[in-house]
């Protein structure tokens, strides 16, 4: 037993309540984060609170000590339907909450990240709270730095590339390390596995087909979280035809809920008369309760789906995913988690064609079985043509080594010019790691010189001057906040002060207000700087000090963090511009330009 593990055993259990009242996809991402924490801190006792309809996944996990369900239909349904008034509904809710209030929790994680759930966090007693809660004046408050980031950046729709699973994992592990000491050493143990859940025994005719070892299966999840993120059923049908007609050992299983029945009908209507052996396509649409659904997803070789919870289920179970990013999807935040998953992003080109999806999938299959000789671009060019290749981006997921910052990263398999929002996402991710992890990536980390386009250079040149100005503004704001702290510390009271003192403090406060307006204006003017203006608002709204001196000191810390973030941003701008400068060409002639060293 390591010394840190022995210390953890002596310290006793850590009672942790996790509030996850969002949808199933969020629940599955939360479970991956909790598994990572449980491996490092075995003394963590996890009590998981979920909505009744999304609790099945948590109930199938042996290392969760208790699953608490919120019967929202039972409590809120009568109120919504007019059968009970507000007072009666609140009494029902109060009665349900009582057992949770009886004894304080060591840790309370509100991973719902909603305003409604913040009231529950505020009511329940806990030594450590993470996520959204309520301040003394009942205003919504963020309990920690990562919660600031969630509100300002992730929910504020600012480009960033840290996966939500990594945000939750880092938030929890940081708090545990601070309050419970260093974790035990489990090496690079993966958190996902085929045995992640303890599933109930499923009896279904389809399961017997798994005994035929020569059969390979790919699952199609029809539908998506929203209609504008779904891939049309007829496209799925065309893809199925490509697979079964060109690969004699591959079969297709359809997955979906009861609300996907119409998609199922459209799928088979499209295929009518086009297949010689229709038995190689099996439909479980409308039949997949959690145990059957998870059992199938754990056994198939691939899952092909748009943005929906099966992407996270497959990630948890270690099944390879081809994710179709259609419509308003942030795949860098919610894409498949693990090594070797593929994402097709069609951006502004509508929906991916079935030929495109087949080409990407077939390369992934051949690559895994080591029977392919062409590289990815050559394969896709031969399959769909160079013109079609430029209409989509294909990314592959990879888990970084710990020394490189850890977490999942999505690497491009198709060549495309780096757009400003992609560049900003990368930079914002590195700034967040510097703010909350204490780990700073080398400047230019994961930026490829060959992808820097003239358009990006034009945008970065504008940002070079703006970021320098913003850094100076943050520096002035930090000085003003420190000055406010010094002046207010000399006062006997925040309410009783001399006229001169009052005028000085008002003058400092007015200066800080003007600087805040400048920060906000710069964020409105240039989108990549919006991260700093939104973080400024959230952090300043979450100042907890009750006296001027405390608020001044906290304000100074906020502006210091902003200034350090802007400094990193500015360094990335400068580095990228230097990286894009012309390089000398090796030849027998003297170079016409000097070789540029971006360092």
Image: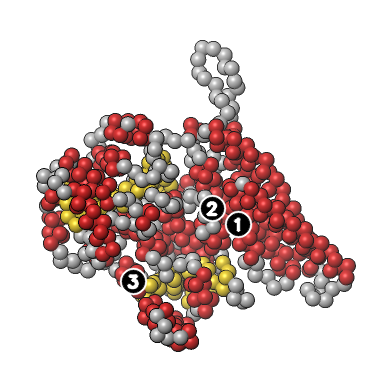
- Residue nearest the observer in this picture, 405 or 234: 234
Residue at 40% over, 73% down: 49
Q: Earlier in the sequence, mark 2 or mark 3?
A: 3
Find out whether the residues at labels 1 and 2 contact each other: C-beta distance under 8 Å. yes
Quote the CA–CA distance across marks 1 and 2.
9 Å
Q: Quadrant of the N terminus?
A: bottom left
Residue at 51% over, 12% down: 588
Q: Which residue is mark 2?
A: 158
Image position, residue 279 (x, y; %): 12, 51
Q: Residues within 10 Å of mark 1 (few under 14, many from 20)?
A: many
**What is the image's colouring?**
secondary structure
Work out whether 282 lies above or below 590.
below
Image position, residue 140 (x, y; %): 57, 70
Q: Which residue is mark 3?
A: 53
Q: Earlier in the sequence, mark 1 or mark 3?
A: 3
SS state under label 1: helix
Left or right of 87: which side holds 71?
left
Image position, residue 394 (x, y; %): 38, 41
Q: Residues within 10 Å of mark 2 (few under 14, many from 20)?
A: many
Residue sitting farthest toward the top:
588
Report whether residue 111 is seen. yes
- Residue nearest the observer in this picture, 230 or 146: 230
- Residue 208 image-quadrant placement: bottom left
**Marking on residue 534:** 1
Residue at 34% over, 53% down: 230
Quote the CA–CA distance across marks 1 and 3.
34 Å
- Residue nearest the observer in this picture, 261 or 346: 261
Q: Earlier in the sequence, mark 1 or mark 2?
A: 2
Report whether residue 321 is seen. no
SS state under label 2: loop
């Amino acid at each position: 037993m390591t010394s840190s593990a022995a210390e953890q055993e002596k310290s006793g259990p850590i009672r942790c309540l996790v509030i996850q009242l969002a949808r199933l996809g969020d629940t599955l991402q939360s479970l991956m984060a909790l598994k990572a924490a449980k491996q490092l801190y075995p003394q963590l006792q996890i009590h998981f609170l979920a909505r009744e309809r999304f609790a099945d996944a948590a109930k199938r996990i042996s290392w969760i000590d208790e699953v608490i369900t919120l019967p929202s239909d039972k409590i809120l349904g009568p109120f919504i339907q007019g059968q009970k008034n507000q007072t009666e509904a609140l009494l029902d809710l109060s009665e349900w909450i009582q057992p949770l209030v009886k004894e304080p929790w060591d840790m309370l994680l509100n991973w719902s990240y909603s305003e409604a759930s913040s009231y529950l966090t505020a009511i329940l007693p806990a030594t450590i709270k993470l996520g959204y809660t309520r301040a003394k004046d009942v205003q919504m408050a963020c309990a920690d730095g990562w919660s600031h980031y969630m509100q300002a950046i992730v929910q504020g729709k600012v480009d960033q590339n840290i996966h939500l699973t990594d945000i939750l994992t880092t938030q929890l592990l940081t708090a545990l390390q601070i309050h419970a000491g260093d974790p035990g050493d489990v090496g690079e143990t993966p958190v996902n596995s085929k045995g992640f859940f303890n599933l109930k025994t499923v009896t279904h005719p389809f399961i017997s087909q798994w005994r035929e070892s020569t059969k390979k299966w790919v699952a199609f999840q029809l539908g998506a979280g929203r209609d504008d993120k779904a891939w049309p059923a007829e496209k799925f049908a065309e893809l199925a035809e490509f697979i079964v007609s060109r690969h004699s050992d591959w079969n297709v299983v359809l997955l979906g809920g009861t609300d996907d029945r119409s998609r199922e009908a459209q799928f088979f209507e499209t295929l009518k008369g086009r297949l010689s052996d229709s038995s190689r396509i099996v439909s479980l649409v409308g039949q997949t309760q959690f145990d059957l659904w998870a059992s199938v997803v754990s056994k198939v070789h691939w899952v092909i789906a748009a943005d929906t919870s099966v992407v996270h289920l497959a990630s948890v179970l270690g099944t390879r995913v081809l994710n179709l990013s259609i419509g308003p999807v942030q795949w860098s935040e919610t894409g498949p988690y693990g090594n070797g998953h593929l994402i097709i992003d069609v951006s502004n080109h509508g929906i991916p064609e079935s030929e495109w999806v087949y080409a990407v999938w077939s390369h992934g299959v051949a690559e895994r079985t080591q029977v392919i000789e062409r590289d990815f671009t050559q394969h896709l060019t031969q399959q769909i043509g160079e013109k079609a290749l430029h209409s989509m981006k294909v990314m592959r997921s990879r888990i970084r080594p710990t020394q490189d910052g850890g977490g999942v990263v999505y690497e491009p398999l198709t060549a495309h010019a780096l757009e400003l929002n992609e560049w900003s996402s990368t930079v914002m991710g590195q700034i967040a790691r510097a703010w909350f992890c204490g780990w700073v990536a080398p400047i230019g980390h994961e930026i490829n010189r060959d992808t820097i386009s003239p358009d990006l250079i034009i945008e970065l040149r504008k940002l070079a001057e703006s970021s320098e100005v913003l850094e100076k503004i943050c520096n002035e704001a930090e000085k003003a906040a420190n000055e406010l702290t010094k002046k207010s510390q000399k006062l006997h009271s925040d309410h009783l002060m001399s006229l001169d003192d009052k005028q000085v403090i008002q003058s400092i406060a007015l200066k800080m207000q003007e600087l805040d307006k400048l920060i906000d204006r710069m964020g409105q003017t240039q989108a990549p700087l919006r991260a700093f203006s939104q973080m400024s608002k959230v952090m300043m709204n979450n100042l907890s000090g009750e006296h001027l001196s405390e608020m001044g000191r906290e304000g100074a810390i906020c502006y210091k963090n902003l200034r350090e973030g802007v400094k990193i941003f500015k360094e990335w701008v400068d580095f990228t511009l230097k990286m894009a400068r012309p390089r000398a060409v090796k030849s027998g002639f003297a170079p016409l330009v000097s070789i540029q060293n971006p360092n």
